[in-house]
Image (cartoon, rainbow, N blue to C red):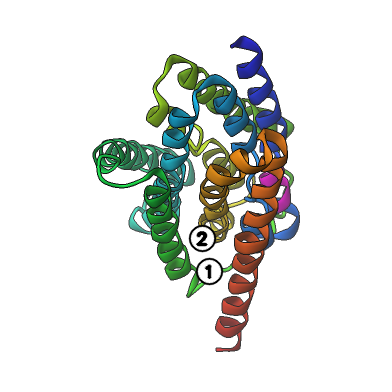
Amino acid sequence: MLEQVLLAAIIAGLVATLVTVLIERYGGLVGGALGTVPSTIIPAVIGMSLAQENADLMASLSVVPLGMLANAIFLSVWIYFPEMIPNLSSSKGLVATIFVSLLIWLLVGTSVILAVDEARNSLSAQEIAIAGVALTAVLGLSLGWKPRATPPGTKKVSKSMLITRGLMAATAIGISVWIANLGYSLVAGLASVFPAIFLTSMVALWISQEASVPRGAAAPMLLGGGSVGVYALLAMTTLDEFGLYTGSLVAWVVSVSCWSLPAYGYLRWRRSIVSEN
């Protein structure tokens, strides 16, 4: 069990630094939409697959798309909540936004676990996952309709912040695999998409740049991150059809091709329309 946890955690930690660097260098549109392709979910799914029977793995995967919906709601807090506290200093505003966004994620995540536990009495794991993907798509497309400015950063994110976000992501994925080993499949599925990357991206960019950079990147990250839910939905079939590693690769390629790239195109289109007006 320890090897599974450590492997998933290390891979997740290495991948986790990519989004901040992409947003810093290319702006929130590219970094947010394309920097959120399925990444840390891959070692999480592989680790959970090795730790669980197939039925439990399907239960874990069914939670992932709805977990990404919880993450989408989490990111929407970063778009709108700072506007509600204009009189707070930047540091106090950051602390308040962190607290509110995590509280809302916890409430939504708990609701997701309870809802899935009830729904699986009448719905298949695939049907639950499809519902999560659809709801995330609706929210992502809606928030991307009128995109905010997505400027590139003007300062470099510190190495200590990059290390911190890598460690947080590694911890979240390691915990998800550990929970899967304990037999709590629904909780493991939700833990695998804990918004460690989203949170540390927002915090790192807020501190090193200014509030407008993470707020501009939130909607692209929200929509682009839906590819993780698509990956989980596809993995329900591809892991059985092609095996663990090839199946993971097939699910990744299809989710990026059918979600991440179209999401990027949609956001670019909406940005051009808004810019012309």
- Vertical relation: 54 (above or below) 64: above
- Vertical relation: 100 (above or below) 131: above
Q: Is residue 36 left or right of residue 156?
A: left
Which residue is more in the foreground, 80 or 75?
75
Res 227 seen here: yes
**Residue at the farthest bottom position:** 277
The image quarter containing residue 115 is: top left
Q: Residue at x 42, y 38 (%)?
A: 95
Q: Residue at x 60, y 88 (%)?
A: 276
Residue 56 drawn at (x, y percent): 44, 28
In the image, which disc is placed on residue 148? 1
User: From which residue to which does the magenta span run?
Assistant: 18-22
Query: Which of disc 1 and disc 2 is earlier in sequence?
Result: 1
The crowd level at tag 1 (other Cα within 10 Å; few <14, some 14-19, many 20+) is: many
Q: Is residue 242 left or right of residue 259?
A: right
CB of mark 2 within 8 Å of CB of mark 1? yes
Task: Please check the rendered image and state whether residue 20 is part of the magenta-colored stretch, yes or no.
Answer: yes
Amino acid type, residue under disc 2 in the picture = Ala
